[in-house]
Amino acid sequence: MMETNRTRRTARDWTFIALRWIAALVVLGALLHFLPLKTVRSAIARVPPLYFFAALLGYLLAHAVGVLKWRMVVNAAGAQLDFATSLQCYGGGLFGTLFLPSIVGGDVIRLAVGLRRSPRPAAVIAGNVVDRFLDVTAQAGLVASGLALLPGSLPHSLQSIATRALLATVAIGVALLLVVFFLRGVFLGGRSFRFRRRLARLRHALRSVSARPHILFAGWLAGTAIQSTFLLLTAWLATACGLQLPLRVWLFAWPLAKLAALLPLTQGGIGVREAALVALLAPFGAAGTLVLAAGLVWEGVTVTGGILAGLTAFVASRHNKIETPR
């Protein structure tokens, strides 16, 4: 019976991932239907192979900093993970974000390895949550910087969209905190002592990392630097495609497009990110064909980087085997 349920669950998961890939292809197909494929192809052909591999190297180096950032934050919560385990968690998570069926597939892999390696599993969960929060605040900071640098040339409609996106992000965070605070009695009612003890450990881990503001600030700076690197690499590839835009325009549009890609519509946000970029850059006179071409080249970088990250995590797991799994 359990085997049958597991088989059904696996089939459902892979059906879900297939549907998300189909949705990504549908979105890209719709973009190519309204934008001339020949022009997009010629713009992509302008990018020298050396540029692509240089962007891929920059992408991987930025994620190497991401490994250090993630390890720093989870260890501040008390996880006590070494670099090899952190590399395995982070690389597997990067691969899972693109290729696993779950919406939170990347975080599942990070936690799956970290929970079995760490003497304090609650610290791994708390640290990963804090790390995600730092990433979101880094993205919001880039959007705010773009709004500040484009006060006069930013169309009113786009300014309204960006402001609403920032306010919605803050409102969702505040609402979640209020729900947890006011419903904590209902949530804890009737729970076992074992469950309460685990929750207390999680709360202690969150307090441990929050008691180190220098770690939080360093993590936020690292997250901002990583996202800024991705932004610069995308703008550089777009310039190679023939798209000339001021950097402050990218600073406004790119983070919003990435936030839009978090919607669980397509696998890894593929297609949604490109559609959002085309819409956000159009008021600045950017040709949709060139924006789409740059977006597709960048998708090539991220997919290739995700595969390499998965291979790295696999190699790390072979040399860093878990002898006594929990």
Image (cartoon, rainbow, N blue to C red):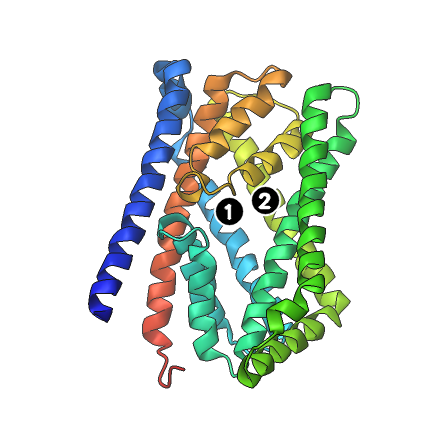
Left or right, 117 with respect to 250, comes to left
Disc number for residue 300 = none
SS category of the residue bearing label 1? helix
Q: Which residue is mark 1?
A: 58
Q: Residue 229 shows which numbered tag?
A: 2
Which image quadrant for residue 178? bottom right
Residue 274 image point, x, y percent: 48, 30
On the image, the x and y values in percent for residue 319 come to: 35, 75
Q: Amino acid at mark 1?
A: Gly
**Residue 88: quadrant of the picture:** bottom left
Give percent across and percent down for residue 268. 43, 44
Q: Is residue 239 visible?
A: no
Does residue 268 sit above or below 92 in this rendering?
above
The C terminus, quarter of image: bottom left
Tell me whether circle 2 and circle 1 mark residues in contact (CB < 8 Å). yes
Bin the neighbour count of mark 2 within 10 Å (Cα to Cα): few under 14, some 14-19, many 20 and up. some
Mark 2 vs 1, N-terminal side = 1
**Residue at (52%, 77%) from the top-left corner?**
121
Above or below, 298 relative to 79:
above
Instruction: Say which of marks 2 and 1 sits in front.
Output: 2
Number of disc labels = 2
Q: Which of the pair 109/202 is nearer the observer?
A: 202
Secondary-structure class at tag 2: helix
Q: Residue at x 33, y 46 (%)?
A: 17
Q: Tell me: 65 left or right of 313.
A: right
Badge 1: few (under 14), some or many (20 or more) residues near its Cα, within 10 Å?
some
Q: Amino acid at mark 2?
A: Thr
Foreground: 278 or 222?
Answer: 278
Give the residue drawn at x 52%, y 83%.
119
Residue at the image point whose x is 46% and y is 48% from the top? 57
- Percent x, y of residue 276: 53, 29
In the image: residue 169, left or right of residue 117: right
